[in-house]
Every structure is written in C-alpha cells, then in structure tokens.
Image (cartoon, rainbow, N blue to C red):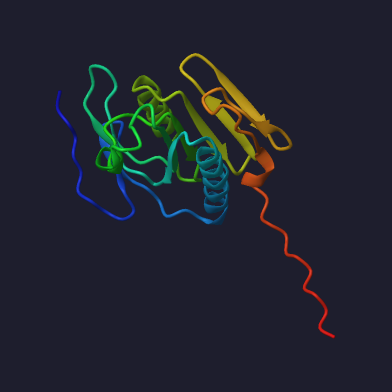
Amino acid sequence: MREITLPEAKPALEWVNGRVLQKVSPQRKHALAQGAFIGALHAWAVEHGAGRVGTEWDFRIQPPGEERRPLVPDVAYLSYDRVPYEATAEADIPRVAPDVVVEVISPGDRERDIEEKIRVYLAAGTMVVFLVEPKNRTVTAREPDASRRYIDGEELRHPALPDFTMPVSILFDEPKPKAKPALG
C-alpha cells in the first residue's frame, strides 16, 4: 500500500478526501475549547499513567486496505498499550491511530471533510472521536457503531477513558477574573 507524504508546513497539512487541507490557525473559541480539553485529558493521563496527550500532533494513519495518510487531530490521546512509554521515537509521528481524537469544529470546516476524518480515524482503530462544537456548546462522541451528544451542563465520560470526567461547560466558558485585593 502506498503512503501519502506531504511537505512540512505551518499550520500543518492533512490529506482528506483525496486532497491536501491546511489546518487553520484557531480563533479564540477554538483555542479555548482545545486548551480546556487537553488540560483535562493530560491531567487524567498523568494521574493514570495511561499514555501521551498532545495538540496538533502529526499521525500517519492507515485504515485497512487504504493508503497511509497524514492527519493532525486538534487533540489526541495515544495509550501506552498502542505505543509503549519506552518507544519515544515511534511516538513522535505515530504510525497508528490515536485511541481518542478531539476535533474542534471551526466555522470554515466542511461537513464532508469532518465526516471523512471521522471515518478514517475509526476505521484505523480510534475508539472515539469527540467533535466539539463551540457554536452549539455541544460535544458529540462518535464511535464505530454509536453516537452520543453531550450538552452544556453535562459531564463528559467515555469508556475509552476510564474514570475521566469533564464538565462540558469548561470547553466554552472563559475563566472569570478574580477580584483584586484592595490596597490599603
């Protein structure tokens, strides 16, 4: 099977629906959701010694019978079961799909491209793709045979991340300023 290779670029390049897509530089709402998700996921991974977490991480993904292609999830979790702790070189640009993918939907994202990325991730072995939609303040967990929408006010939980919980609202609410102490 052939591998699709793309030149290095900033923002990163991905191969979706037979064409090159360049990741967009995120706006504030995208950055807020991405930062909050990685913060919660990283804390969980450290606490459980479960694996690696990263943003804009370059993966080379190959569903069965298809070409290997580059995809760069907004947030990814890769367990030590898939790429062991000691295999640091393999973890730089993994040739396996992440266990968990988070994609924050941007205004310019095409639905057909989003659906293709989900299809590729799940076909290659990702357990769940979380689609974060800042506009609707929702998160949709997509699995090979199921889908569940989490709304603002709910706790996000999923079997792919045992004991992980995160209030959906932290993805969308900016931290409030603290009152400054009076100078006296």
Residue at 14%, 27% (x, y): give it.
Answer: 2
**Residue 14 can be seen in this image:** no
Most extreme residue toward the bottom, as rendered? 184
**Residue 157 can be seen in this image:** yes
Q: Position of residue 26 (x, y in %)?
A: 47, 53
Residue at 46%, 17% (x, y): give it.
Answer: 144
Q: Position of residue 172 (x, y in %)?
A: 64, 47
Q: Is residue 44 above or below residue 161?
A: below
Q: Is residue 159 above or below residue 167?
A: above
Q: Quadrant of the C terminus?
A: bottom right
Q: Position of residue 54 (x, y in %)?
A: 42, 45
Q: Position of residue 126 (x, y in %)?
A: 41, 25
Most extreme residue toward the top, as rendered? 145
Of the pair 84 and 135, the residue shown nearer to us: 84
Of the pair 145 and 162, the residue shown nearer to us: 162
Tag count: 0
Most extreme residue toward the left, as rendered? 2
- Using residue 27 as the reference point, say whether residue 70 is left or right of it: left
Residue at 58%, 43% (x, y): give it.
Answer: 40
- Using residue 94 as the reference point, say whether residue 76 is left or right of it: right
Residue at 52%, 47% (x, y): give it.
Answer: 34
- Using residue 177 as the reference point, say whether residue 43 is left or right of it: left
Q: Quadrant of the N terminus?
A: top left
Q: Is residue 4 above or below residue 12?
A: above
Quadrant of residue 116 within the rendered picture:
top left
Of the pair 22 and 165, the residue shown nearer to us: 165
